[in-house]
Amino acid sequence: MSIRQELEKRYHNLFIDYALDRPLDAKNICSVIRQSLHRFLLGAKKPALYCNGGHTQMLMADFMYELKKVKYIVDNYAPCDEDHGFILIKDEDLEIRGIDAVILSSYKFRNDIKQSMKEKHPDLPVLDIYDEFEQRGIMLQSDYYYSNHPYQHYKRINQLQREIRSHTDIKTLHELYLRLVTKYIHIKDFRTALIKLEEWKKLGGVHQEDTSRIDGLLADVDALYELQKKAAESISENHVLMLCIDGLRYQDLSEEYMPKLSREFEKSAFIFDNAYSFSTSTYESLIPVYSENDDLRTEYYNRNSISEQECRFVQSACKQNRHIYFYTDMDTFVDSPNIKYSATFQTATEKMWSFILDASEDEKGLFYIHILRIKSLLFFQPLYGKQIDFRGNCSFI
């Protein structure tokens, strides 16, 4: 059995042996949304999202390129003078504004909105992404990002940690710790899962059977984590690893905050202290960087990917017969049949898990790990227990 097979087996056995809730398959969910949006908006000139709330904020953040044409949000109850960067309108204004396609952005109210649209605007095409899921046999019980999205993972983790701090009932605390540890296992953050398991173990006040379950889970997670580290240590030195971490400030890359990483940078690194950015947005800066094209006349800012022929480092990897892996959520950035894409939203720990599995089976690869989120700093603070305000693609402490 390969080390990859051993890691995957031990991980899946955790759910079987300890009856833990399994995570949903986020890859299919993200793929369905992207394909549906692309197909539906192909001929639309003035599309609108219906419903101004958290669902719309998430959809716009996760699929910003697909929804680039959207300038209008329909909501009968939101004040139209609010400044969100979009034009807020009532549904009675759809024809007046020339809206030619409507995307329903709500799970809870989607059926009511569909019925209203059918009665008031029968000729307007409407997309309900949850209908698309059901046609493919994916039966969601809540908003799409509740299933297996980094945003929801960390929102739920933060909520559970605050509940643990506010409860004193032993039985309730045991239930909360079980959910919290399970969440960390879902995102492959075994180091933090072990910390929380140790806290859980110290609670006491349970039957011997429950104590044995906690001890067994702690031992198995620890063994899995040690095997993961062993796999990381055995990765071939012929590999090339590229990291793009948005929100990682140079001032934090220090001996005080990140000693191991800072020491590696001290050995061999180029540090630019007076650099020029192509955009105020990291996302929009990447295409000109990877294509080495800063000519605005080429309108590179209208693109979300480039071809293999436009990217020198991918071409070099192909010439060197390297296998190429991109852990870039739902983005491709470089279109190439030679690149294996993750094609799903992942936390930083999930990306490292995928990298270790792939690298353990390869001898000469190029691995690009990409963490592009304004709220990514919170991904590195799994123990943070105070209230976090999750709004759109940004989080505030």
Image (cartoon, rainbow, N blue to C red):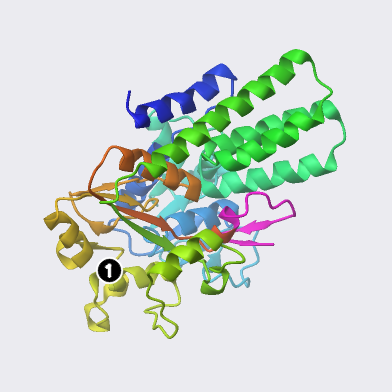
Q: Which residue is at the far left?
A: 319
Identify which residue, 381 or 337, lies in the foreground.
Answer: 381
Q: Position of residue 305 (x, y in %)?
A: 27, 62
Give, as a single range, the part of the protein colored magenta. 378-397
* Image quadrant assignment for residue 159: top right
Q: Is residue 46 left or right of residue 182?
A: left
Q: Which residue is at the far bottom?
A: 274
- Please give the name of the residue rendered at 68% of the width and 38% of the height, measured from the top-left corner: 196
Q: Is residue 37 left or right of residue 18?
A: left
Residue 297 in the magenta stretch? The answer is: no
Q: Position of residue 380 (x, y in %)?
A: 57, 55
Residue 72 shows in the view: no
Q: Is residue 161 left or right of residue 269?
A: right
Identify which residue, 90 or 256, lies in the foreground.
Answer: 256
Disc 1 residue crowd, few under 14, some 14–19, many 20+, Cα 10 Å: some
* Image quadrant assignment for residue 172: top right
Residue 256 shows in the view: yes
- Please give the name of the residue rendered at 35% of the width and 45% of the height, measured from the top-left corner: 342
* Majority secondary structure of magenta residues: loop
Residue 396 in the magenta stretch? The answer is: yes
Q: Position of residue 292 (x, y in %)?
A: 24, 75
Image height of 126 relative to 287, above or below:
above
Identify which residue, 344 or 67, lies in the foreground.
Answer: 344
Residue picked out by circle 1? 290
Disc 1 residue type (three-letter): Tyr
Q: Which residue is at the far front?
A: 267
Q: Which residue is at the far right?
A: 168
Q: Position of residue 390 (x, y in %)?
A: 63, 56
Q: Is residue 259 left or right of residue 28?
A: right
User: What secondary structure is marked by label 1?
Assistant: helix
Q: Quadrant location of the N terminus?
A: top left
